[in-house]
Image: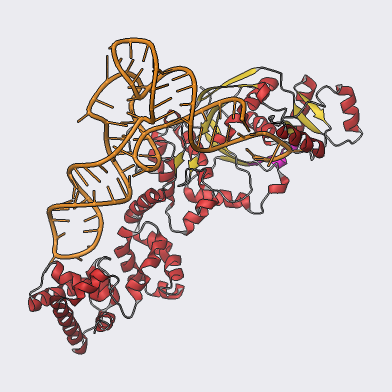
Amino acid sequence: MKKVRVRFAPSPTGYLHIGGLRTALYNYLFAKKEGGVYILRIEDTDQTRYVEGAIEALINSSAWAGVVHDEGPYIQSERLPLYKKCAEELIEKGFAYYCFCDKDRLEKLRDDQKNAGDTPKYDGKCRDIPLEEARRRVAAGEEHVVRLKLPENRVIKFTDLVKGEISVNTDDLDDQVLMKSDGYPTYHMAVVVDDNDMGITHVLRGDEWLISTPKHVYLYEAFGWEQPVYVHLPVILGDDKKKLSKRQGDVAVHDFERKGFLPEALVNYIALVGWSSDDGSEIMSMQEMIDKFSLDRISHSGGVFSIDKLRWFNNHYIRIADIERLYSLCKPHFVSAGFCTEDEYESNKRRYVLIIEALRERLGALSDIADFKDYYTAESVSASDSEAADIMEEPGSKAVVASLKKILTDRVASGEAAQISGDEFKAVCKQVGAETSQKGKGLFMPIRIAISGEMHGPDLASTAEILGARLIIKRLESWE
RNA sequence: GGCCCCUUGGUCAAGCGGUUAAGACAUCGCCCUUUCACGGCGGUAACAGGAGUUCGAUUCUCCUAGGGGUCACCA
């Protein structure tokens, strides 16, 4: 059995997005599972679409997600001589031909065909120009491209590992341009030349390539090369069931990083849109996914990307994350939410660690921290809804608030520290309960609302420890 | 429009001729908890439709419908 070699081959036209990450991930998982090699190749054959810094962004996002290539990156624009040589070989063998049609003619041709209700297709004008003549014109500097010379009415078959056997008639295909007039290869030319040259054994790529695979298969035949195993991955869809795109919100991997999604959560979740393990596991580390990965469990149909489920995974990983790691990851979120400056964050480490500990069980993303800004920093509070307001109107509640305020005020007045520990606060609550004969919800709900204005929120004892007695008293006063 | 692919609950999905049709997210309810959560238990909810093949179809075949992809000197 030949050693597995796979590749992820993005074009540097922007940032790595969710769909690209999953394609990369599946390639990576498969390579690791099979003890093979995962290669990164940059398909930059369209000079007009190149985006500065895109290659670095692609690599950084992948690395963040834990998908690291073993070989490469290979850059296609640095391999032009190879494609040129291969194109000439094709022409020599009669599998391709020079075409001198200009873009205006082709455009008009397409329009006419469309208007006539036909499928746009090259009409073969240059197909039969004698090679000698064509070469003369090329030598004379005439602008040209190289086109694939597809045989007529031939059925090309190939087997896709997830879609099964696919067959397409060459009459439904076009004489695809292989080499552009600027000397760069098109995707179709570059993929097969490179996949062959790099010894790629399995091609795992997006669904959108399924239709053009027959052309690639034909090229392998023309060159006399052994074709790889094809695996076309189902698309990732947005909520509207359309292909996931910018329109539906963030799709760049970097956006998820910025919002406070942990890489292990994103990777774990994304692996499950389009693939499932045979034992039904959902929470999996990268290593577990590698161990369980198999191509025959890839879905046939597209899947909707569910931000809710991603948040659930993320919450799981936030809960089990090391606190030091969270402390450092949460910094930008506290700062941008207006909790503190960077310096304050560093010098009040204990305070922020306490907040993180209290919040980690309810965060779907680290950026949710912003939702708790008022909870932890407001000077005064008021009932967040009518239900809370009603509870505060009850006599029992008023007694609880009064008692709590007195105990806390006395405590501060007697010279005790305004700092109050969670255990001390619990003791205070117990005392309030004894003085007012309230217990359970009747005791804690008024306290909770009086302190935060809300009926739901983080644990009270830790909240009190974070706020301190003075701020609590201040908030209690806002109910008078 | 031509060609190709896809179709199990709201979502991800298991299932690969005979099952009470898994599980997860979401949702609802109960229990636990002197608060909020966590957690535990349970509920609602699906084989797109129609013909076949078969003793028997979610599973195999065909048709219809719906969805997606693709028809560039873009990948």
Given residues A55 and A132, the one toward you in this image is A132
Image quarter in which the C terminus of chain A is found: bottom left
Given residues A387 and A158, the one toward you in this image is A387
Q: Which residues are magenta?
A: A74-83
Q: Is most of the magenta stretch helix, strand or loop?
A: helix
Asked if residue A479 is positioned above or below residue A318 in the image, the reply reads below
Whether residue A338 is visible here, answered yes or no, is yes
> At 77% across and 38% down in the image, what residue appears?
A107
Given residues A380 and A85, the one toward you in this image is A380
Residue A418 lies left or right of residue A139; in this view the side is left
Is-magenta flag for residue A82?
yes
Asked if residue A352 is positioned above or below residue A412 in the image, the reply reads above
Rendering coords of residue A101 (x, y %):
83, 33
Rendering coords of residue B70 (x, y %):
62, 35
> At 41% across and 47% down in the image, what residue appears?
A306
Given residues A424 and A479, the one toward you in this image is A479
Residue B41 picture quarter: top left
> At 54% across and 48% down in the image, what residue appears?
A245
> At 88% across and 35% down in the image, what residue appears?
A142
Asked if residue A340 is positioned above or below residue B65 in the image, the reply reads below
The image's colour scheme reads: secondary structure
Residue A21 lies left or right of residue A405; in this view the side is right
